[in-house]
Image: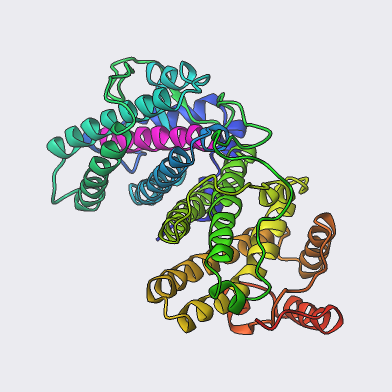
Amino acid sequence: MKPDIAFGDFFNFAATANSQEILELIYSKPHKESLIKSKNFLKFKNLISSYIYSLLRTMEFESCWLISCKSIDFKILLGEKIGFDARCLDALHSRMFEKLAFRYLPIASVAYSKNFANSVNLQDEHEIALFLSSLSQDLYENIQSYLTDADPTADEPTYITLTNIKCELVSQLEKLKEWSRKDFPIESLSSTSEDICCYSGSEEIPAIANFPGKSSNLSFSEASIVTHKSYADLMSDNEKLRRFSHYVYIDVEVAAMEVCAKNIVSYKQMPLDFKLDMARQIWDEARHAVIMRRLLEKLGGKEGDYTYSAKVWKKCEKGSNVTERLAIQQAFQEGNALESNFLLTEAFRNADNGEMTKCMDFINADEAVHVKIGNFWMKYLLDGNTDAYQATMEKAASLINATLSSNVEINRVARRISGFPDAFVDVIEENNKVYGYRKS
């Protein structure tokens, strides 16, 4: 049972709360007016808050680095790690509100916060991996200490949550250590420093790159590498399928990770649940990239065989605020792509490609979630105003020189699942009659 969405808005709370209010949240001592009577309960509650502080700041750093780093392998690693951090944050954030908290701020010692300040300028992927590995190892050890001291019956919900996180951390550490096995010295979460800092959303983060990094084996070109005329044509020609796979791998899936990463760090005033949703999509897109790369390699191709255009990134950059970015990427482009994907899935099935048919079904399910995320947050930001939603979508289409129509026949079930207003779907359907759409 999650709290009201505004309760996760740490940025606004930290900006408006007075110092006494914050101190009471952190240092509240058991007394007759307090709901909390046990010092141990308060200690464990503050430990969870410190884990949230660590994960939240780590996720922000990873998002910046996902955009700037050049290796696609490392981008995928960061995408998977961001997804892991978000799942942990979601569970721990919910648990905080079960521990007699109306609101809270993530806290850590000032000494621990300096780990991030000292690493803000890291650029080398191996050094970044070392830093993240050290943070994960320290989190693992602190969770183990919590589990050792906790009462597994009285605090069973937290005990189970932390046990699951600890098990998953092992896998994350193995992946990070593949990049380097040296140690990166950091201050521990268990630092005995008495100076405490709160997450405010104004902390320094690595520079947000103006344009995503790419490895030297990838060359940029605005020219499209896709040459098929229909999905039937695509399935009949391996060269066309290699081109398409490379395009989706780099220009769609990897680019979507980069776009969502920028949303996390450029709009830190958004509620925590928004960041978790963006992280969920990054995690999904990382898996999709692996699937499309696997198809490319199965067809005899490899990364760098063709150019990339970064058109998904460039189109999203035309949005002047988060609402417009969501309209361009999640609601408009991914909304239309979802319907196209159903036809692509059918084409794979007709071509007897059972593996890709199965994978596309999972991809389509993920994409429906992404479109629903975009629609949810657009409505949230527009206060549910349907006229404002329509106007924002019209502007989004205009910004990327498109018409407010789809490239294939409207699938009303998919649109409903993805959270589109019925009146808006009617508009697209009418525009399809004017502009036409592809049949296959």
Which of the 4 quarters of the picture holds residue 358?
bottom left
Q: Is residue 213 magenta?
A: no
- Viewer-nearest residue: 118 or 148: 118
Which of the 4 quarters of the picture holds residue 418?
bottom right
Q: Is residue 194 left or right of residue 317?
A: left
- Viewer-nearest residue: 71 or 257: 71
Please say if 222 is above or below 20: below
**Percent of width and height locating residue 3:** 46, 55
Q: Main secondary structure of the magenta part?
A: helix
Which of the 4 quarters of the picture holds residue 338?
bottom right
Q: Identify the image's colour scheme: rainbow, by chain, secondary structure or one colour.
A: rainbow
What's the magenta region? 42-64
**Number of marks present in the image shown:** 0
Considering the image in quadrants, where does the C terminus appear? bottom right
**Percent of width and height locating residue 224:** 70, 55
The residue at the point 56 percent across, 63 percent down is 239
The residue at the point 36 percent across, 51 percent down is 91
The residue at the point 14 percent across, 35 percent down is 149
- Viewer-nearest residue: 356 or 10: 356
Q: From this viewpoint, is residue 31 visible? A: no
Q: Is residue 225 left or right of residue 369?
A: right
- Viewer-nearest residue: 8 or 63: 63
**Percent of width and height locating residue 270:** 61, 45
